[in-house]
Structures are given as structure tokens and as C-alpha cells.
Image (cartoon, rainbow, N blue to C red):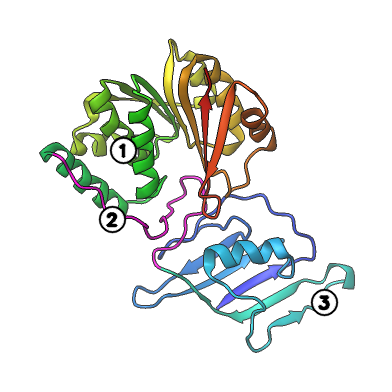
Amino acid sequence: MIQLNSERLFKVNVDAEIRRNDCRSFESIMLRECKLPARRRRLRLSAGAAFDMQRTDSKRLLSRFAKLQFPIRSPANFRENPAMPFSRRRLIAAAAVLPIAAPTQALAQRGGRQPPPENTPPPLPRDDFERNAFEVLADIHKNQRFLNVSRDDGRLLRIWADLANTKKAIELGTSTGYSAIWIALALRRTGGRLTTFEIDRERAATAAANFKRAGVDGLIDIVVGDAHKDVGKVTGAVDFVFSDADKDGYLTYFRALAPKLRTGGVFISDNMAIPEPDPAYVRAITTDPDYETVFFNMHRTGVAVTHKRA
């Protein structure tokens, strides 16, 4: 059953996640409780939010990420609470069931999310080092929380870092290290190093352990702290940037690192569709003739690849 306390006004500004057996909040619904029994593929949750079930954009979000079909067809679909003034009555959508795909689409910034099913075959290792790294990546993907990118997006990060012949890479938002391992696999060939910033000490510690397991700890430096402050301390030319920290900070990070990005370098931004990006940041990467930006996977979480032109 899904229970949504909904006001006529659509006003939501929360990050969120939907995850098996552990739900905290939803991009457009503040979930209080969420349980997905292991043997079932139906999400049972209760939520309180300023969420208008009749708005097209509300429907789009739920339809995209929870496979919810509209209109919701169930007994007692909507009920008014007569105790509230008419102008502020809340609609309660009750007894609606959300069938969801497993694993469920990620929604929140590094919020314990599980990416959608992969569309490509798994990568093939070229040597024992890669074989071990791929096994570690598969284990992180399957068993750890706070996965920050999908496997396919991780592979793209590796390809882009390789094509840029990256010597110096910066990552904003380490989480538990999944994306950094993919980048480091490219740096193993290019002879580069990655500096990754993470504000959460526990996640940084988990990432450090994952780097050691994957054999890439010698290629990565972890900076634990606030990237808003620390990113300004980066010195020298930068070849590759992956931004996956707080979305409100994207413009700050770009302004700090773009002058240091060498000609031909790339600045990659994750979650450019969900959560909605800062419009000022989008303008910054799309209206400057010195940079060319292309958006990928906007039907999912969205990735922007910004290339510094010659």
C-alpha cells in the first residue's frame, strides 16, 4: 500500500532514495517508512509530502522510477479529510500498489541507491589485475550501499579518462569508491593519479578499503572534508573531473576547476536529470564558447560531459 498525504500545491525540495528494505526519502515524496519484502516485488510504503498526484510532472517522476501507472485504480482511490478547511484539504491516495523492477532506479545523490539493470554485457578482463578489480566492483555493486553510478556509467568514466590521456583527475563525491575504481583503471594505463573528495568519514573509510581490495589504492588520494572549501586548493593542470557531490555545489566546483582544466580535458557531471540541476550551472556549461557540453542518459539520472575546446 502506498499512502500519500497530498496537498494541492506541488512544493518539494528533498533528496531521496528508494531501496530494497531501506527507504528514506523520494525525490518528490518524503517517505517516512518503506518495506519491500525479499520475496515480493511490491513496494509498501507510507509517506507525507506536498505532492499533487494529478500534476503531469508528479506522474512523470513516479511513472519513471516506480513504474506506477496513472490513474491509480484501486478502491477508495482518493478521500478528502473533512476536518480540514476546504482550501487546505488533503487528498489521501490509499490502497495503491507500486510494482517495481528489481533493482530499483536510483534517485538520491549518493543515497544508498541501486542503479537500473545494465544494458551491456560485463567487461572482459585483460589480466589478473583487471579480473580482481572487476570482481571487487561487482561485489560493491551487489552488496554495498551508496553506489554512486551504474556499472555502464562507470565504464564510460573509464573510457573518457582513458581517451583524455588523463594524468591528473579530480573526483567530487567519493561515496564508497565505486566510480573512482573505474577511473583508476584508466589511470593505470595513462600513468595518472586521482584525487577524490568525500565529506563523510565513514564512506571515505569504506572507499579506502575498496581501493585496497581492487589494487588501485596507490593511484588514488582521498581528501576527507568539505569540497566547497578544499577544491580551491587543487594546484596545477587538471585533465579530468567527475562531479558527483552535492548538486548545489556544481557551479562552485566548475568555477574553481574550469580554469585549471587543460585544453582537451573533460568535466563530467552526474545526476543532471534527477535531482533537477542548478539552472545557473547548466547555463555555465552550455553558453560558454570555450566549452562544448553533451547530455547523456537523460531518461535516467543524466550525465553531462563538458569538453574544453582548443
Closer to the observer: label 1 or label 3?
1
**Quadrant into which the N terminus falls:** bottom right
- Circle 2: residue type: Pro
Q: Cβ–Cβ below 8 Å for labels 1 and 3?
A: no
Q: Is residue 309 visible?
A: yes
Tell me where the magenta segment starts and ends, as one range: 102-126
Q: Which residue is mark 1?
A: 182
At 49% across and 20% down in the image, what residue appears?
231
Residue that mark 2 sits on: 121
Magenta residues: mostly which secondary structure?
loop
Residue at (61, 30) in percent of width and height: 285
- Residue 4 percent coordinates (x, y): 65, 70
Q: Is residue 298 left or right of residue 35?
A: right
Residue 192: x %, y % from top left: 30, 21
- Magenta highlight on residue 111: yes
Amino acid at circle 1:
Trp
Residue 152 position, x and y percent, is 37, 48
Q: Which residue is mark 3?
A: 83
- The residue sitting at 65% across, 28% down in the picture is 284
Task: Identify the residue at horizontal 42%, vertical 59% (top origin).
Answer: 116
Q: Residue furthest top?
A: 236
Labels 2 and 3 touching (C-beta < 8 A): no
Residue at the farthest left position:
128
- Mark 3 packing: few (<14 Cα in 10 Å), some, or many (20+)? few
